[in-house]
Amino acid sequence: MHHFSYKHGQLHAEDVPLSQIAEQVGTPTYVYSQATLERHYRAFSEAFGGLDTLICFAVKANSNRAVINTLAAQGAGADIVSGGELTRSLAAGVPAERIVYSGVGKTVAEMEQALDAGILMFNLESAQELEVLNQVAGRLGVKAPVSLRVNPDVDAQTHPKITTGLAKNKFGLDMELAFGKYQEAAKLDHVELKGISCHIGSQLTKVEPFADALERVAVLIGRLKGAGIELSLLDLGGGLGINYNDEQPPSPAQYAEALTERIGSLGLKLVLEPGRAIVGNAGVLVAKVLFTKDTPAKHFIVSDAAMNDLVRPAMYDSFHAILPVMEDPSRPKVVADVVGPICETGDFLARDREMPDLERGEFLAALSAGAYGFSMASTYNSRPRAAEVLVNGDRWSVVRTRETVEELMRGESLPEWME
Ligand code: LLP
């Protein structure tokens, strides 16, 4: 459930008409709903209320500080994958002891930054990473809190580009190898074994792969216990899907119901890393129709938002509903491609989509754009990145100004032989 709906013939974010934002801030602009963010966070925290749980928002899904701040105020922690995300999360008020650090390629400088900050846990993904972190922690005179991220080799049944828990994926440690690595890690001087983690993929629409992964991890936890290695944190990652089109993903409550009993039997504190399920349907991308055009093959709607603003359709063929900001039930439907100004055939927001026939100059909204929207934006074709706005009831605020071309060129210079 989200708070974007038509009221008095106009698409609103909560109580604010999107046209008002588009006229004042320009387009393309990402608009987020604070009430939706809070609601989705609460859906998770209530669903897992029976367990000792820390919900670490996956900052990669949306790293705007106002978004992170909104969630931190509800009690969320952060799942980070870079020093940049650590800096942002701390700046947005996430306490370090609620931060977990994932990812296959942490640099020494990033390890130092996270150790200095005092984060809850590093989720380590390779034997070398464990070795290096142990050295870095030793140099700083601290103990690094760690979990090993295991790869449970289950099929998440999602898009191949966002599947992470298969043996052939780059993520995590093989389960068998992990058992041995835990025993080695237990002997290291500057590492404290805190937990075990896994993340099998994103946009999952069934609970079974989560349950299978949990079962495999549970077996390993049992084996480790038998070998005298007691852990306190179980991090099951993120990955719960959302409804973009006609998917019917489990709700956080159904997800919790399928897992709670097994998790409870393990006696570990639960860490979750949801990204998309919290922020995906809490954001839309508002754009303007620049032109429409017909070719013998197709009807095109050229919007001022492009693949640099929202790359998901180009990258994963993903579906985002496209709605006119002004509702007019009487207008005819067409089958159209909604495309952007970028010089790539792959630059589209929708393809062969039956939709209202939009006209030049009007505003449209691409829905479900809150996750992996702005955070994956680029400046390809020297297009400054969109503005971001947060709505709260009838109030709204620009939480990131539109980038300027001057900002794009900042840091560039000519070599002295050209001056
Ligand atoms: N934890 C880890 C270790 C992750 O790698 C991810 C996402 C998450 C948590 C959050 O997953 P979520 O709950 O959002 O599914 N750009 C793609 C999605 C990539 C996901 C990468 N990892 C997309 O636009 O669909």
Image (spheres, rainbow, N blue to C red):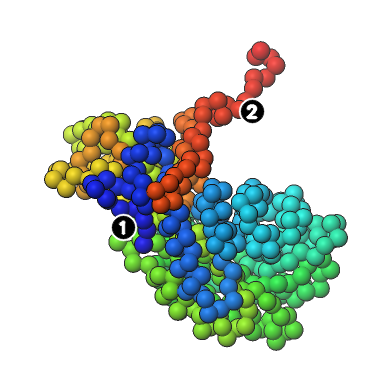
Q: Quadrant of residue 331?
A: top left
**Mark 1 element type:** loop
Q: Cβ of disc 1 within 8 Å of ligand 1? A: no
The one nearer the camera, 294 or 40, is 40
Residue 369 drawn at (x, y percent): 41, 50
Q: Quadrant of residue 39?
A: bottom left
Which numbered circle lies on residue 129? none
Residue 45 drawn at (x, y percent): 51, 70
Q: Name the residue furthest top.
A: 419
Q: Cβ of disc 2 within 8 Å of ligand 1? A: no
Q: Amino acid at mark 2?
A: Gly
Residue count near mark 1 (Cα–Cα under 10 Å), binned few <14, some 14–19, many ≥20: few
Residue 341 drawn at (x, y percent): 37, 32
Q: Residue at x 58, y 73 (%)?
A: 53
Q: Work out whether mark 2 precedes mark 1 in sequence or the reverse, and give the earlier one.
A: 1
Which residue is identified by label 1?
Answer: 245
Residue count near mark 2 (Cα–Cα under 10 Å), binned few <14, some 14–19, many ≥20: few
Question: How much space separates mark 2 and mark 1, taking CA atoms?
Answer: 42 Å
Which corner quadrant holds the C terminus? Answer: top right
* Labels 2 & 1 near each other (Cβ < 8 A): no
Which residue is identified by label 2?
Answer: 411
Q: Amino acid at mark 1?
A: Asn
Report whether 97 appears left or right of 60.
Answer: right
Report whether 118 appears left or right of 377.
Answer: right
Q: Residue at x 66, y 59 (%)?
A: 95
Q: Residue at x 33, y 63 (%)?
A: 247
Residue 372 drawn at (x, y percent): 47, 50
